[in-house]
Amino acid sequence: MQKNILTGQKLMQEEIMCGCVDGKIIGTGQADYTVDSAEYDLTIKGKPFALIDIPGIEGDESKFKSIIEKALKKAHVVFYVNGSLKKPEPNTVTKIKNYLRHDTSVYALFNTHCSPKKEREAIDKTYEQELQEVYKQEEKIIAQSEKALKPILGEHYKKSMYVNGLLSFCSRAIDETGKTSIIPDTNIKTLRRDQVKYIKECGGNVKIMQKLSNMQTVEDIIAEQSEHFDDRILSENLKKLRRKLEDSKDVLSLLQKEETKKIHEYINAYDNYLQNCNDAKSDFLTNIKHLGNTVANDSLEDMKEKLFKKIEDDGGKTSEWEIRQIIETDMEKIVKNIEPHINTLIARYQNEYQISLEEAQRRLIKDFERTDKKFSINLSTVDIDGLSGIMESMQFTKKDFGKALLTIGSLILSGAMAGGALAGATTGLVLGSVMPGIGNAIGFIIGGAVGLMLGVFSSIWDFFAGRDARINKCKQKIQSVIDDIAEKIQDKIDSEIAKLHIEKELDVIQNKIVDAVDKQKQGLEDVKLILKRVTSVFENKIAELNGGKYGTI
């Protein structure tokens, strides 16, 4: 065999003609020799495999990051090759961990260097003895290295072993006829020389070369992987599915938790909004309820003050003619002004009601904004696309999911913003001018009471001799008559206001608001239910996987 390898230039020419390829991807020692990933198809026990060679990651591998990531996404087993008698750097191991898939197994190969000699002296040890001594040193390095490998790689890490990669290569780069298959490239011409030396060191026995390289340990791992490959692929795919389900479930569970809290606050905001609208309605009705009393007292106040002043000026002996003149003069003014006064007050109350509803909407929007800031997770920022594939496999489409989740955005916009459903519901109260001609009716009420008021004065003059007593008694009588007039005016105004059915009109508006809010709240409740439903589906699928329904994990 050695004779065949040492045939010289003529043999090299023949090898070029035969297309020798071994050694083509072996590095020359320069930094970053491998600058791309190379994939080699293999068949082991009838099953297809791929061997992927990727750039190293020690130092700055940033320019190869995408290449490494792409290659390692496919890998079920990674052999991390470390230099001879060299412990792996923790930073390098951490980089490896960051690149790995969940189900990848990692084996550390310590590529031991033990150079062959062209000639050995009698006192020299054999190559095998020298190599075994280096292997023993390597074992110590491996024991120390595992202290870094196991904690960082965790369950990914399987085992460390030493190999002599160059010796293994040289033992295998020989064809069936005993010829070398190493390419005759001047850049790697030392490979041929090393091969010749290794063969000589091992007495021309290729099997000894292969045994001493310790590459059989790697072959055993690959053989074990190939033997149970189908089962492992199924198991790993089930694990991958479970992790995907668990990751998705975790995201959804967090969303469910956070969004449920947020939805509760949204619903509370709507409840507060309804309460504020109810308060506005109550305030309006209270004002309307007291409108008759307010108008009556306001209308009669000026006339009462004039009568009191006249009585005081006259010492309680004001003539009936003067009393009648004050009453008739003021009655004309009251008849003229009472209807505009009523309409002015109603318009003011209506405006205050409208302002209260608008303020309730502004508070609702503020509550929504405050809630959005309070919670860091928002459905509108969730990557639903990232979950869509696995959700569609469970007959739960992204379209349905996204539509339900994004309902929150439309609810807030339609429910809280001006021009939305709630804003439109508050603009329906238009009462306009009310009770035309009520001034004349009030005039009859006042006129009918004048005789009663005048009839008391002559008896008061005769009965009460003292000035102050007369004045006080006259005021009391006037106040009593005016109170009676005010009560009749109030009753008349109340009866006319009742014909406007203001409370019924407010109920219509309030019902529109309640209906709109109920739709918003129901939409929010639907989002809660759909989040709960999806999370439950994921939990059930995970339970089925763990229970072995689809195979053993």
Image (cartoon, rainbow, N blue to C red):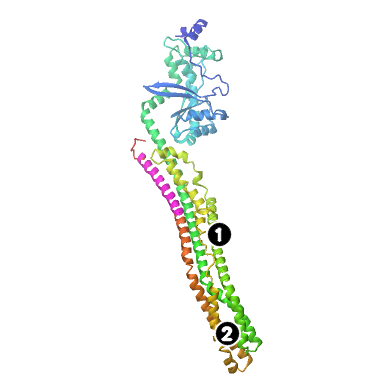
Q: Main secondary structure of the magenta part?
A: helix
Q: Amino acid at mark 1?
A: Glu
Give me the C-alpha separation between circle 2 and circle 1.
45 Å
Residue 501 drawn at (x, y percent): 47, 67
Residue at the spot 60% in from the left edge and 76% down from the top edge:
333
For the residue pair 403 and 367, the one nearer the viewer reads as 403
Residue 113 drawn at (x, y percent): 51, 21
Per the rendered image, the range of residues in magenta is 519-545
Q: Horizontal placement of 544 versus 90: left or right? A: left
Q: Dot 1: few (<14), some (14–19), or many (≥20) neighbours within 10 Å?
A: some
> Dividing the image into 4 quarters, which one contains the C terminus?
top left
Residue 145 versus residue 504 in the image, above or below? above
Q: Dot 2: few (<14), some (14–19), or many (≥20) neighbours within 10 Å?
A: many
Label 1: element kind: helix
Whether the magenta-drawn stretch holds residue 529 is answered as: yes
Q: Amino acid at mark 2?
A: Ile
Residue projecting furthest to the right? 313
Residue at the spot 58% in from the left edge and 94% down from the top edge:
463
From the image, tell me which residue sits under label 1.
359
Residue 9 versus residue 95 in the image, above or below? above
For the residue pair 281 and 483, the one nearer the viewer reads as 483
Label 2: element kind: helix
Residue 376 drawn at (x, y percent): 52, 48
Say which mark, if any, is on residue 521. none
From the image, tell me which residue sits under label 2.
478
For the residue pair 335 and 185, the one nearer the viewer reads as 335
Q: Horizontal placement of 149 versus 542: left or right? A: right
The earlier-in-sequence mark between 2 and 1 is 1
Residue 61 drawn at (x, y percent): 56, 29
Residue at the spot 42% in from the left edge and 43% down from the top edge:
400
